[in-house]
Amino acid sequence: MTLYGTQLIRAVTAFAFIVAMFTAPTSAQDNEVDPAEREKIEQIVQEYLIENPEIIALAFRELQRRQTMARMGPAINSYRDYLEKDPATPVIGNPNGDVTMVEFFDYRCGFCRRHFPEVMKLVREDGNIRYIPRQFPILDRQGETPVSYLAALAALAAHKQGKFEEFHIATMTSKGSLTEDQIYQIAGTLDLNVERLKADMNDKLVIKSVQNTLAIGKDIGFEGTPGYIIGDDVVTGAAGYGRLVQAVSRARREANARQSAE
């Protein structure tokens, strides 16, 4: 069992005890635990939580995960095969990895860009993750050039030339505010055929893929970017390397448990 799993069990146990102590009827408490013994137990729990305050954060994080999955899980599960197994969708990392991480992102999202090095660090250091970036261009505004949407189309068009990963990394790490001209400049620096790229951006299947992901992300309940689906965990926002590691570890642990039970 991982350190995180052990800490979580301790946190749940401590909180379960506290809830039982303070929500049970007074008469039941008096019958089960005498005042002196009750005081000793309360002191032990209090001292443990003071010495290990991170346990409280872990417990609340687990509560948030369960609440999020209760809200978003049914929709995620209904779309999971499409999100994780669509053969037309580009994959970064290990295509045969034992954990799949789906990210809903927008190329113009500052949080996505700042978090991207953490994502790639995890994918490269772990070596067994299927990382699937899903186009979720939600930052365009009416009356303006739909740069997020065009970048999403361009990325999938680059995939048709076998260079999705290169285009994705170059665009996510580009400097300044992304523009339409910059999209094609990035493509040119990667030796992509820009005229073919523009033609493929009008491919009905490319357009449909972006539209599908937009509809699915909204149906699941993502209201911003980035958002990650990792097993039975949802990570919203630029939560950091450690949070992603925890989600991947949980997904791997639960997958192994299911395999052992079969």
Image (cartoon, helix red, strand yellow):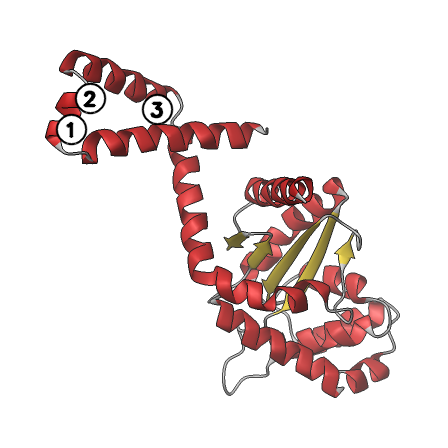
- Numbered marks: total: 3
Q: Position of residue 178 (x, y in %)?
A: 64, 70
Identify the residue at image location x=56%, y=63%.
Answer: 77
Nearer mark to the viewer, of 2 and 3: 2
Tell me: 183 left or right of 192. left
Pointer 3 or 1: first along the chain:
1
> Residue 135: percent from the left, percent from the top?
64, 70
Q: Secondary structure at mark 1?
A: helix
The three-letter code of the residue at mark 1 reads: Ala
Report the disc number at residue 28.
1
Asked if 245 appears above or below 151 in the picture, the reply is above
Residue that appears at 58% across and 42% down? 250
Point out which mark residue 49 bears. Answer: 3
Q: Is residue 219 above or below residue 36?
A: below
Residue that mark 2 sits on = 32
Q: Is residue 242 above or below residue 51?
A: below
Element at label 2: helix
Q: Which mark is residue 249?
A: none
Contact flag, marks 2 and 1 (Cβ < 8 Å): yes
Give residue 36's position: percent from left, percent from top.
17, 12
Name which of mark 2 and mark 3 comes first in the sequence.
2
**Image spot of residue 225 (x, y percent):** 53, 63
Give left or right: position of 215 versus 128.
Answer: left
Q: Amino acid at mark 3?
A: Leu
Looking at numbered disc 2 in the image, what kind of residue is underneath it?
A: Glu
3D distance between C-alphas at marks 2 and 3: 23 Å
Q: CA distance from mark 3 to mark 1?
A: 25 Å
